[in-house]
Amino acid sequence: MLSCHEIAQYFLSKVDEDAGDSISNLKLQKLVYYGQGFHLAVFDEPLFNEEIVVWQHGPVVVDLYHRYKKYGAGSIPPEEIDLEKYDPKLRELLDEVYSVYGQFSASKLRALTHEEPPWKDTPLNFPIPHELMKTYFKTQISA
């Protein structure tokens, strides 16, 4: 199983600065959240072990937040990764998440997560249960 850091690095490797792409810490948190949610829905198992916690500005992996907080609201530089580390089915899922959600701003993603049951139905500063995420994200998959 990969870590939340490896999932974050995958999303950061997708950034095309020449095309105007950028990912802030807030946006990265939401992409990692959507990756976890859809992985739970599709594969019935977590993508990574670290908890996703309900914070004021949406779902957050606390350790990941602290790793990138030095960038504030600015762009995190793209990262090089070893694609061999990522199973082709996982890459397909993460690429789909990036294709759908990567186009949105951090504030748009924040607003989206605030409308979804996993964030709305979990108390502030508590981890979002995997079962709650799986149940919700299964409703978001087209059959």
Image: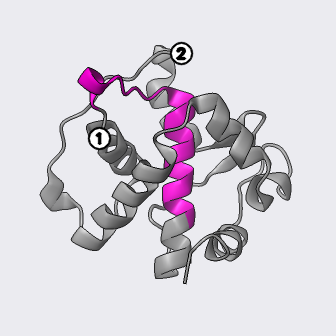
User: Is 89 positioned to the left or the right of 42 in the image?
Assistant: left
Q: Determine the image quadrant of residue 48.
A: bottom left
Residue 72 position within the rendered picture, expressed as x and y whole percent measured from the top left: 53, 15
Q: Residue at x 48, y 69 (%)?
A: 39
Up/down of 138 relative to 107, above or below: below
Q: Is residue 79 visible?
A: yes
User: Is 121 positioned to the left or the right of 27 in the image?
Assistant: right
> Does the magenta segment cover residue 96?
no
> Does the magenta segment cover residue 36?
yes
Q: Determine the image quadrant of residue 51.
A: bottom right
Residue 19 position within the rendered picture, expressed as x and y whole percent measured from the top left: 29, 26
Frontmost residue, 47 versus 26: 26
Report which residue position mark 2 lands on: 72
Mark 1 crowdedness (10 Å alpha carbons): few <14, some 14-19, many ≥20: some
Q: Quadrant of the N terminus?
A: bottom left
The magenta span reads: 16-37
Q: Quadrant of the C terminus?
A: bottom right
Up/down of 63 relative to 93, above or below: above
Q: CA distance from mark 1 to mark 2?
A: 20 Å
Q: For the residue marked with disc 1, what is the amino acid?
A: Lys
Q: Residue at x 51, y 47 (%)?
A: 101
User: Which mark, by number, is residue 14?
Assistant: 1
Up/down of 125 relative to 57, above or below: below
